[in-house]
Image (tube, coloured by chain):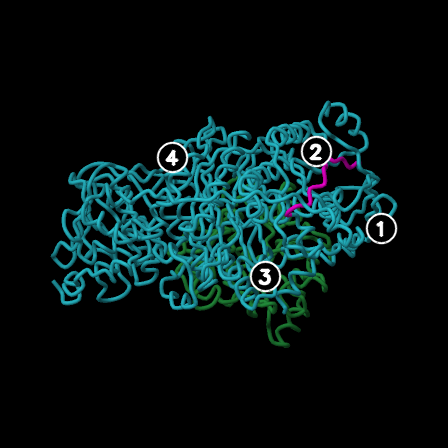
Amino acid sequence: MQAAVIVFPGSNCDRDVAVCLEAAMGQAPLMAWHGDAALPKCDLIVLPGGFSYGDYLRCGSMAANSPIMREVVAQAQKGAAVLGICNGFQVLTECGLLPGVLMQNTGLNFVCRNTRLTVTNNKTAFTAQYAAGEEITVPVAHNEGNYFADDDTLKQLQDEDRIAFTYAPSDNPNGACLDIAGISDKAGRIVGMMPHPERRAEAALGGEDGKRMFTGIVEALS
Amino acid sequence: MSKSQSHINDTQITDEIVAEHGLTPDEYQMVCDHMGRTPNYTELGVFSVMWSEHCSYKSSRKWLKKLPVDGPQVIQGPGENAGVIDIGDGDAAVFKMESHNHPSFIEPYQGAATGVGGIMRDVFTMGARPVANLNALRFGQPDHPKTRHLVAGVVSGIGGYGNCIGVPTVGGEINFDKSYNGNILVNAMCVGVARTDKIFYAAATGIGSPVVYVGSKTGRDGIHGATMASAEFDDASDEKRPTVQVGDPFTEKLLLEACQELMASDAIIGIQDMGAAGLTSSSVEMADKGGVGIWLDLDKVPCRETHMTGYEMLLSESQERMLMVLKPGREAEAEAIFTRWGLDFAVIGELTDTGRMVVSHEGQTIADMPLGPLADGAPEYERPYVPTATAPAFDAALLTKAPDMGAALKTLMASSEIASRRWVYEQYDSMVMGDTLAGPGGDAAMVRVHGTDKALAISTDVTPRYCFADPVEGGKQAVAEAYRNISATGATPLAITNCLNFGNPERPEIMGQFVGCLEGMGDAGRALNFPVVSGNVSLYNETNGTGIMPTPAIGGVGLLKQLDKAVGNRLTGNGQVIYLLGETHGHLGASLYQRDVLANDTVFAPPPVDLEKEAAHGAFVRAAIDDGLLAAAHDISDGGLAVAIAEMSIGPGIGANITADGDAAFWFGEDQARYILVVETDDAVALEARAGDLPLTRIGTSGGTDLQFADKVTISVAELHDLNEGWFPALMQG
């Protein structure tokens, strides 16, 4: 399978997620440059965390308009699996592949800590190795992770079973609507999430709850 | 010559202008002697920053030379952008700590942010990838009207920079004391990892080699920042805001990646960060270290403002800029890399054989100065000093008013020094890069060397109360505590960086504190084989004649060869046996108990430091961890034995029954060279057997949800946890 990690200027979790993909696939993913207009055909595309374009203008908005994103959107529409983590989730909402926006945390501060998540939907391409309703621990690290969408959109997300992860109700770090930590598109092929599964994918880093995101998608695509 | 340029260099140099540049009349005369003529305005500006205390270390050099800087582990000691030590397998750790005190007081967000940005550039200039940031912060009294504003701004600035560039902030320390009301301290430390055969140095060689400017454009920010950092504050210090630089972590991230890419080739001869005193100090240092001359054409310098004079370009401290000397003919490949990362790249001069710095602007030579005197010609002062008077021993009569043990422990767990720093460190990305094994909150942070099974243990330490009461013992203790914090993880302490924050060195009693602290620090470094490989001096931390407590912050780095052997500082289960290693004499002088429980600020002698015992006990702890005997280990410091036990207990929420017994001095004395060691029951016999003559005492067992002290005092762990966690949020909520 072919996987690519998109590198925007200011991405800073690109290496971290590449390490996890390599562990899951047995081969390193392609690191694709933001300014390239072409991208080899990919089965999996990851938009990593970080501060693309310095988060200037609005988180993810400039990255959403970079040359490579036209190619990412085109491949996503043809069925490539896409995962956006943290800043990558912000890019996915900015480019319209996922609905809603990520607003500033209600606490007004950057927050980096472990959060308890519920795997709300284990039928996406990325979450099949989790049990439905399973509780996992995965860290967040963001200043704009407060997921917001209008009531109709939220209802649609619920009706179509597109909420992939929620924070435990007492552990919502940013004020997100419905405690939403991650959502998917209707087909479950595109997932955006604020928590960083790549930061908790080996025992030495405190736990392996994030690892099945990567082994799961590799299994689904192989 | 343009009007503005001719105007500035036509200015008659008066006594007032010399004084405004922070030069004394004698120093100005030395400048004239070196020049063989009166300097023009631009040349005066260049001399003034190069000879500022901040850049020249003119008050401190004599004493810095006495510090231990050698060891088989040392690859590069003080004098470069950062120190370099060998961590085996062809890997090196590159690290330094630096102050950004004055700017952070005036503009806390940008002051702290650019402090973090500057120290990271010092590290990646040497070819290393930064892997960990720490910061040692001192603020005024918690209830001082400026404290909350300063804490919020500094924390936000540190996070804003480090989080964006994507280097984890893994540890540090914070103190609050009234002596910092008018001068906060922001000391940033960065640790990077490089290959030992790919270390880059500043020295520029090769006549005719191109001098290249990369990074951000030059603006008018930070002009005379180094001079500001070399003077006391007064009531008008807020007017110095324009001398504070403005940081852009996004550009620094691009600069980091572009430099790493170019460093993978062999195109670079020398490279130097444009930090304090900007283009001036970077070009002077590179050319002087290489024993050559340098010619700069300021018309080529990328500027973001119009009509900048040469004086402004030379002295600007705009951030995220680097100066490099390339091998001739390699300009095009270097330019391609920087252009791809969206950064400015300009050849702005070349190396010459003149031994001089010659600067052209708008077709005219605007400065022509000998390099040697600029770099090394600043006078070295032997400032008069008065050794700090010996403080009396703690007055035990004070204990007649002491509260009961349980109340005292609660007070300490919720004190400004012991309270949890969660409010602070959750604003820092401590996990990015995916190698943080132990982040904030432990004895030392642990960061894996990427792609290996080894880890660096890093800690920042100093106890200013001790340094104020007895600079020599305080200097020793700062080094010893860093040594203990690293040893408690299982890592071997290898080397330190220091950041020496003091008041006005022109006052003999302040100079006495400086000399004393360095003596203690030197003794400890030698005894513990823990040499100093880099550092920074920040003097003039005074406002209206009142100085800070002497604060020689230490940043220690150690190596754990097998990361899976590391232990933490928390109880890990019920029924574990708890030991105290080290002698307890009950030293309460200069203790936190004296300050916060007895609310007494008399100056008493701090606990003495026995360096032989520090070495022996540290070695014992490391060996026990290496053999897999320990479940946890914790250094005993502020608040003594009782606080150390409580700290091990509140994280996991596991209680303990402590059978040892004593008075307030026993529970809260801050005797040195002590650790708490925790073992599983099955390992107790083995630990005791190997202790031999070392003072290892069994003091209790873990379990339950309460801390019980000698069947006399019982406190719920949950209550202590809440007291400990509650203080900082309450402070910041106001």
Between the C-alphas of marks 1 and 4, the distance is 57 Å
Q: Earlier in the sequence, mark 1 or mark 2?
A: 2
**Chain containing mark 1:** B
Q: In this view of the protein, which residue sits in the foreground, A187 or B117? A: B117
Circles 2 and 4 on the same chain = yes
Looking at the rendered image, the quarter that the N terminus of chain B falls into is: bottom left
Q: Residues within 10 Å of mark 3 (few under 14, many from 20)?
A: some
Between the C-alphas of marks 2 and 3, the distance is 33 Å
Colour of chain B, in one word, is cyan
Q: Nearer the viewer, mark 1 or mark 4?
A: 1
Measured as percent of width and height from the top left, residue B692 is found at: 73, 22
Question: In the structure shown, which secondary structural element does the residue marked by tag 1 occupy?
Answer: strand
Quarter of the image for residue B227 reads bottom left
Q: Which chain is green?
A: A
Residue wearing tag 3: B141
Between the C-alphas of marks 3 and 1, the distance is 31 Å
Q: Nearer the viewer, mark 2 or mark 4?
A: 2
